[in-house]
Amino acid sequence: MQTALTKNLADVFERIRQSAKRAGRKSSEIKLVAVSKTHPAETLREAISAGANILGENKVQEAEGKITEIGRGAAEWHLIGHLQSNKARKAVQLFEVIHSVDSLELAERLERICLEEGRENLSVFVHVDLAGEATKAGIAENDLASLVEFLKECKCLKFDGLMILPPYSDNTEDARPYFISLREIRDNLASQNAFSNGTGELSMGMSHDFEIAIEEGATIVRVGTAIFGERVHRLTRISADKS
């Protein structure tokens, strides 16, 4: 019997396919990161069985328990949340890809830890802040060049792409200019041979706006609610607010 999760996941894959078709792209160009933060290991196992082979976690400490229980080889694990410097070593040990490198200092720390841990390759994306939101992480565009120059010289860190988290809006079209700007930055860096993988990934788009992100060139979309449903603690808070 098909569960809600397996149906949701199939629906998201179909929406990716349709969005890619509208944009004249191949759906095979787009990777889905199933954002599994706050969900228990048994739910993640169901998602993996249903075809979610990349899982995205926000917090290193939470992810560690799940990865230990499920197994690092069961899926490709991505860190998509802000990385505190004191969690950098554990992140190097746990994740295949880190989407959230947002400072030269963090990149230097990750490179040093990789050398100490004997990790030869760690794929990283730079989280770019194009909105200047004080409450969010991300490196300003004006500070990007120095970070990119460092990453290009790294022995262990592989600079493979850019990530963005636009300001939330009920009107999903509001995100489009940010996606366009990030794509233009990516294209400019690619023309300078800045990326280890050549073209540079674009990690952009979440449950409410991933179709627009695909239209604007996303190669990785990070989708949680549309697959797993609302997080339990959020529903509890909403219920309490209404009581």
Image (tube, helix red, strand yellow):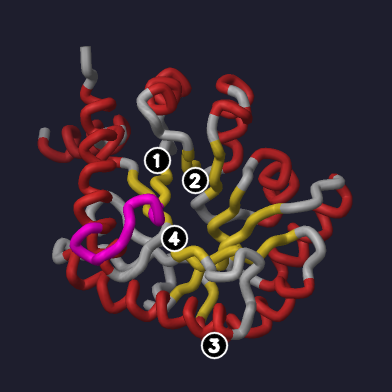
Q: Which residue is mark 2?
A: 58
Compared across the picture, whether 194 is left or right of 166 comes to: right
**Earlier-in-chain disc, 4 versus 2:** 2
**Nearest the camera: 16 or 99?**
16
What is the spatial separation of the Cα atoms under label 3 and label 4, in whole angstroms? 20 Å
Magenta segment, which residues?
21-30
Q: Is 207 displayed left or right of 73 in the figure?
A: left
Name the residue carrying label 4: 203
Task: Give the residue pinned by disc 1.
Answer: 34
Q: Residue furthest bottom?
A: 142
Discs 1/3, front: 1
Precedes in sequence: disc 1 or disc 3: 1
x and y percent of residue 217 in the render? 35, 68
In this view, the residue farthest toward the left is 242
Which residue in the structure is indicated by mark 3? Answer: 142
Check disc 1 and report its element: helix, strand or loop. strand
Inspect the image, locate mark 2, and give the three-letter code of the amino acid beneath it.
Answer: Asn
What crowding class fits label 3: few (fewer than 14 Cα within 10 Å), some (14-19), or many (20 or more)?
few
Left or right: where 73 falls relative to 212? right
Dot 2 surroundings within 10 Å: few (below 14), some, or many (20 or more)?
some
The quarter of the image holding the C terminus is top left
Indicate which disc, 4 or 1, sits on the residue closer to the N terminus.
1
